[in-house]
Amino acid sequence: MNRIASMAATVGVGMGILSAPALATNGDQMLGVTAMQWGMAGAYTAAPQDAATVLTNPAGLANLPMEEFRADLGFGFLNPPRKANGLDSDSDLYLIPSGAMAYRINDRLTFGMGMAGLSGMGVDFPDTAPGLAGNQAVVTTKQFYKIAPGIGFRVNDRLSLGAALNLDYQSLALYNPNFQLPQNQVYGFGATLGATYRVSDALTLGVSYATRQAMDEFKWNTLAGEYGMTMDAPPILSVGLAFEPMPGLLVEADVKHIGFSEVLDKVDFNTPGGKTQMNFGWDDQTVFAIGVQKQVNPKTTVRLGFNYGESPIGPEDVDSNIGSLAITEKHLSLGVTRQLGQRLFGSLSFAHAFHNKVTSNSGSGNTIELEQNIVNLQMTYRY
């Protein structure tokens, strides 16, 4: 009986103010933007893979392998089997679009622009508390897209600097036993700054910083009155070290700090009855990624990567995050690029996020679990 009462409290309070269903890779942040970046499991800060570096480290634009122009366009599919209290979510396939281009203005200056879905997803649970009367359904949908025009400037043969403006789009819909908030959208902005420094012929250091993305307030008009909430995206600091011991072989290791506690610890929620607070309790996350890239012949390059970041949601926060299952920790990725023509390249990647399960330590018995499969396809044209 205590468990049923505890679950009722979770539904009425935790899910009743639930938001931010997450694309659970590194928290709610994807490992990469394109198939090349996914193939390296998120290790791309020091050695840019493609024009999508404008979204991750714009300094990399100045070092891209191209003469005048390149375009990197692609899409991916995310399959995230997940459960809450042993019940499956009905939605299990999501589309991830991405695209970027770069134009070399001169030997020092390169302009780029990219667009990608960087976080989002949702859940579709028909019932999260079978011990209660009726179906305690929870359905959520969230999307976060970023458009980033930017530049990379090669100061000298060793140092490159970059900056990009972030133009953000976010949409959110929430359905649970307490209220139904239809899909709504807001806009925001931020910036990404970066640098790369070639320490030696074989060693390159990269650093990038994405500021907190300041979003407008969501507002929903309902029969009960107006609801409102602001959900910013976290700041991200990345440091990478790329090692090229011989031509055709690249090894990169990255460390990232994602400031989730700034945006998903406590979130104000305005309701017709007054202001309340959602205590999601997300912790900052430190992510470690390593990727290896090997050119096996003049037309084929393969990649292998591993990524680890401790879940920002701990046992003490499960009750407040049943609809936000951002708990995967270990990721393994594979990738390949094949030259298809004189200027055309195709890339494919597959990543698996290993199953992880977290049980509440509050006594409620609530459990959330998740694993993922992600496939990305990319076409590159450069000249």
Image (cartoon, rainbow, N blue to C red):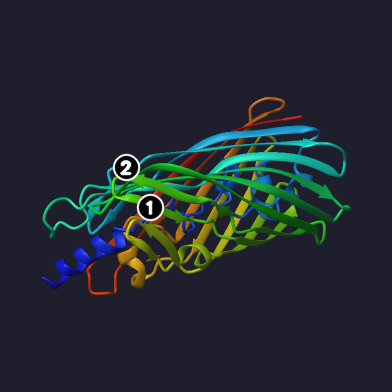
> Residue sitting at 37 percent across and 50 percent down?
226
How dense is the environment of label 2, judged by Cα within 10 Å: few (below 14), some, or many (20 and up)? some
Does 355 sit above or below residue 143? below
Q: In the rendered structure, which amino acid carries the disc numbered 1?
A: Tyr
Q: In the rendered structure, which amino acid carries the disc numbered 2?
A: Ser
Q: What residue did someone put label 1 on?
A: 227
Front one among 269 and 225: 225
Please provide percent x and percent y for residue 368: 30, 60
Residue 352 shown left or right of residue 87 in the figure: right
Q: Furthest residue to the top?
A: 341
Quadrant of the drawing holding the N terminus: bottom left
> Residue sitting at 72 percent across and 33 percent down?
70
Please provide percent x and percent y for residue 350: 48, 44
Residue 198 shown left or right of residue 307 in the figure: right
Q: What residue did someone put label 2 on?
A: 91
Q: Earlier in the sequence, mark 1 or mark 2?
A: 2
Please provide percent x and percent y for residue 45: 67, 55
> Residue sitting at 81 percent across and 62 percent down?
199
Mark 1 touches mark 2? (CB < 8 Å) = no
Residue 270 shown left or right of residue 289 in the figure: left
Quick one: SS at disc 1?
strand
Residue 132 shown left or right of residue 87 in the figure: left
